[in-house]
Structures are given as C-alpha cells and as structure tokens.
C-alpha cells in the first residue's frame, strides 16, 4: 500500500517537473561530428573570425521604421549571430532578414517532414495567436513585435532552444572560453542538425518558393490565422515568383528575357 502510494507520488512529481528536452538539444548532445564536419567548421570559423554580437554593425533604421532593430532577442542562435544574420546571398538577404522578425530561425534551418509550425511567444514561452500582416493596411510606425514567431514543433513540443534555457547558457559560456579547436567541434555539433552541410555550394535554409507557392506550402497558413485572401497573397506573391527565375548566383535577368 505504502509502496503504491510512493510510486504514485513519484509519478506525479515527475510529471510536474518533466519538461521535454528540445530536439535540437538532444541532437547536440548525441552527435559525434566526424573529422570532415569538424574541419569544415574550423574552415568556416577561420573565414569568419569577425562573427561577434554585432549591434554596432547594423545599419540605422530606414524610412519611418521606429523602434528596435533587434529581430530575435530570445533565439538561441542570437547568442552568436547578428540580428540581421543574412549577408552573403545578395539577392535574397534582405527578404530573409525581414522574415527573421516573425519566423524562427529553425523554421527555415531545420528540415524534418514531421514538424508542424505554430505561433509561439519566445518570451512568454507559450503558444499564442500570432498576427499575419499581409494585406492589412498598417503604418510603418506600427512596429512588428519580435517575440511571437512561427516556430517548429514535433508533437507539440518545441524542437528549438531559447537563449535562457540552461543548456543554451552552458553553450554560450563554453563558447566564450573555448580555444579554436574546441570551437570547431562545438560549432560542428550545434550546426549538425541544421541543413547547412549539404555541400559548400548548396544554399542552406528554406527557399522562398517552399512557402510562397500555391501547391503545397511548408506552412499550414489557415492554421496560422490567414484568411483566404491572405493565403492567396502569400502563395502567389510576385517577389518570390520573380526570384524563382534565377537558377544560380551569377545569373542576370534582363527585361528582354522577362518579356519572352
Ligand atoms: C555558439 C555560437 C553559435 C550558435 C549558438 C549558432 N551559430 Fe550558426 N554559426 C556560428 C559561427 C561562428 C558560424 C560561422 C560564421 C558564419 O558563417 O557566419 C556559423 C555559421 C552558421 C551557418 C552557415 C554559414 C555558412 O557560411 O555556411 C548557418 C546557416 C548558421 N550558422 C545558422 C545557425 C542557426 C539557425 C542557429 C540556431 C539554431 C545557429 N547558427 C546557432 C556560431 C553559432
Ligand atoms: C525565411 C527563412 C529564413 C529564416 C527565418 C532564417 N533564415 Fe537563415 N537562411 C535562409 C536561407 C534561404 C539561407 C541561404 C541564403 C542563400 O544563399 O540564399 C540562409 C542562410 C543563413 C546563413 C548563412 C550566411 C549568410 O550570410 O547568408 C546564416 C548564418 C543564417 N541563415 C542564420 C540565420 C539565423 C541566425 C536566423 C534566425 C535569427 C535565420 N537564419 C533565419 C533562410 C532563413
Ligand atoms: C518559412 C516560410 C517562408 C519562407 C521560406 C519565405 N517566406 Fe515570405 N512570407 C512568409 C509568410 C508567412 C509571410 C506573411 C507574413 C505576414 O503576413 O505577416 C511572408 C511575407 C512575405 C513578403 C511580404 C508580403 C507583403 O506584401 O507584405 C514578401 C515580399 C516575401 N514574403 C518574400 C519572400 C522571399 C523573397 C523569400 C525568399 C528569400 C521568402 N519570402 C521566404 C513565409 C515565408
């Protein structure tokens, strides 16, 4: 009798305190990067010595855009990456950076068929009903809040880490004190679950057309609160459609070609 009671008690305690460990953390803890991955990381780190928390690098706001330039204050990725993390791909970087305000890094940087995407407040750490702004007549003064984001979930558990998670804090501390070779291993571990190592050439991250298309969007737009007009506006938006014409980085498209 007493034993059953204790077991039930332990079970209750466990279910109160059992917070799921985010998938990304499990992957970082379990992966043993091979030599090639570590070498690639070391190479990236040599090439990009200047990756620091770079508030100072950010260009001041343009037009009437008031308020903060911070795009993802609670994101684990922001431990190291700048608020506008996309720089290399000249054609798409501005658009990707614009999306960072309302889409979590992992939504575009983790590929897994089983994920579903929901609005999640990164500060309150809870599901919220977020806001799609497309088609709405908003003034630029009406700054988009940065904490609700469209983020990835596996069976309703978040797969991503937040800056304030114990594990994320540990990584941040380890990173600060690590030497170059330790950094290469840690970098390889953190980025192993992100689809960045495909090849040096392939672009990492979800391309525009995977969300902006009228066949099968990566996102369940009605579930994210889009009305039929918004679904259509997102799926058939002219800018991602135009960018689809480019098949490689060096390609130039002339007006003559567009008119063909
Ligand atoms: C502990 C620091 C750290 C954390 C945390 C971190 N990164 Fe990185 N990441 C780096 C560094 C340093 C580089 C190499 C420099 C560069 O290319 O920007 C890099 C490179 C990358 C690249 C590839 C760049 C290339 O040229 O191949 C991607 C994509 C990326 N990170 C995405 C992410 C995402 C998404 C997250 C969060 C899930 C994240 N990173 C978390 C430090 C970090
Ligand atoms: C809307 C999708 C999307 C979101 C959201 C997104 N990324 Fe990316 N990211 C991409 C794509 C696509 C690329 C590949 C760029 C290219 O070559 O076109 C990329 C490339 C990168 C790179 C390579 C370096 C560079 O200069 O392009 C880094 C680093 C990176 N992302 C970090 C992040 C971080 C950190 C976040 C969150 C704060 C984030 N990304 C959010 C789509 C996204
Ligand atoms: C992960 C899915 C996803 C990816 C990838 C993505 N987008 Fe979007 N994009 C959206 C969503 C959702 C909205 C609607 C945001 C809203 O209404 O607040 C949007 C909005 C936009 C808008 C603003 C529309 C307007 O008129 O207000 C433009 C422009 C745009 N995307 C272009 C692009 C381009 C270009 C790329 C690739 C570089 C891209 N998107 C990649 C999901 C995505």
Image (spheres, helix red, strand yellow):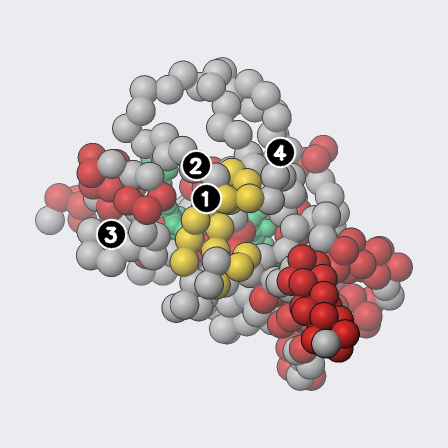
Is residue 236 rendered to the left or right of residue 115?
A: left
In whole angstroms, how far apart are the C-alphas of marks 3 and 2? 21 Å
Distance CA(mark 3)–CA(mark 4): 29 Å
Which is nearer the N-term, disc 3 or disc 1?
Answer: 1
Disc 3 vs disc 1: Cβ atoms closer than 8 Å? no
Observer-nearest of 6 and 87: 6
Judging from the image, what secondary structure is the residue with disc 3 in? loop
Residue at the disc numbered 2: 130
Q: Residue at x 62, y 39 (%)?
A: 123
Dot 1 and dot 2 residues touching (CB under 8 Å): yes
Residue toward you, 218 or 37? 218
Query: Which of the 4 image quadrants contains residue 49?
Result: bottom right
**Residue behind label 3 places its C-beta within 8 angstroms of ligand 3:** no
Residue found 24% across the figure and 41% down from its top: 231
Callout in the foreground (4, 1): 1
Give the distance between the C-alpha atoms of the residues marked 1 and 2, in whole angstroms: 5 Å
Of residues 94 and 33, the one nearer the viewer is 33
Q: Is residue 6 left or right of residue 33?
A: right
When asked about the image quadrant of residue 232, the answer is top left
Q: Nearer the viewer, mark 3 or mark 1?
A: 1
User: Answer yes or no: do the residues labelled 4 and 1 have beta carbons within 8 Å?
Assistant: no
Residue 167 lies, with reference to residue 163, above or below; the image says below
Residue 28 left/right relative to 104: right
Crowding near the residue tagged with mark 3, few <14, some 14–19, many ≥20 C-alpha atoms within 10 Å: some
Does any portion of residue 18 appear in the rendered image?
no
For mark 4, what is the residue?
Answer: 70
Q: Which residue is mark 1?
A: 119
Looking at the image, is mark 2 or mark 4 earlier in the sequence? 4
Number of the label disc, if any, that sits on residue 213: 3
Q: Is residue 166 above or below residue 101?
A: below
């Amino acid at each position: 009798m007493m034993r059953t009671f204790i077991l039930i008690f332990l079970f209750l305690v466990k279910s109160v305190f059992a917070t799921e460990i985010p998938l990304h953390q499990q992957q970082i803890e379990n992966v043993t990067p091979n030599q090639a991955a570590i070498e690639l990381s070391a190479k990236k780190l040599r090439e990009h010595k200047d990756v620091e928390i770079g508030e100072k690098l950010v260009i001041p706001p343009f037009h009437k855009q008031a308020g903060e330039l911070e795009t993802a204050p609670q994101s684990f990725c922001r431990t190291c990456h700048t608020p506008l993390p996309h720089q290399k791909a000249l054609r798409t970087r501005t658009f990707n950076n614009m999306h960072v305000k309302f889409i979590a890094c992992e939504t575009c940087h983790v590929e897994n068929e089983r994920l579903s995407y929901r609005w999640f407040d990164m500060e309150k750490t809870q599901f919220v009903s977020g806001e799609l702004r497309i088609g709405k007549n908003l003034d630029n003064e009406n700054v988009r809040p940065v904490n609700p984001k469209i983020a990835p979930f596996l069976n309703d558990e978040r797969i991503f880490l937040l800056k304030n998670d114990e594990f994320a804090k540990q990584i941040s501390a380890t990173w600060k004190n690590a030497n170059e070779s330790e950094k290469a291993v840690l970098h390889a571990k953190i980025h192993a679950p992100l689809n960045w190592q495909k090849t040096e050439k392939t672009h990492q991250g979800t391309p525009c057309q995977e969300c902006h298309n009228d066949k099968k969007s990566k996102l369940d737009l009605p579930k994210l609160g889009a009305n039929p007009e918004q679904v259509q506006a997102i799926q058939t938006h002219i800018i991602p459609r135009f960018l689809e014409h480019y098949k490689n980085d060096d390609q130039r498209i002339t007006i003559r070609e567009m008119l063909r």
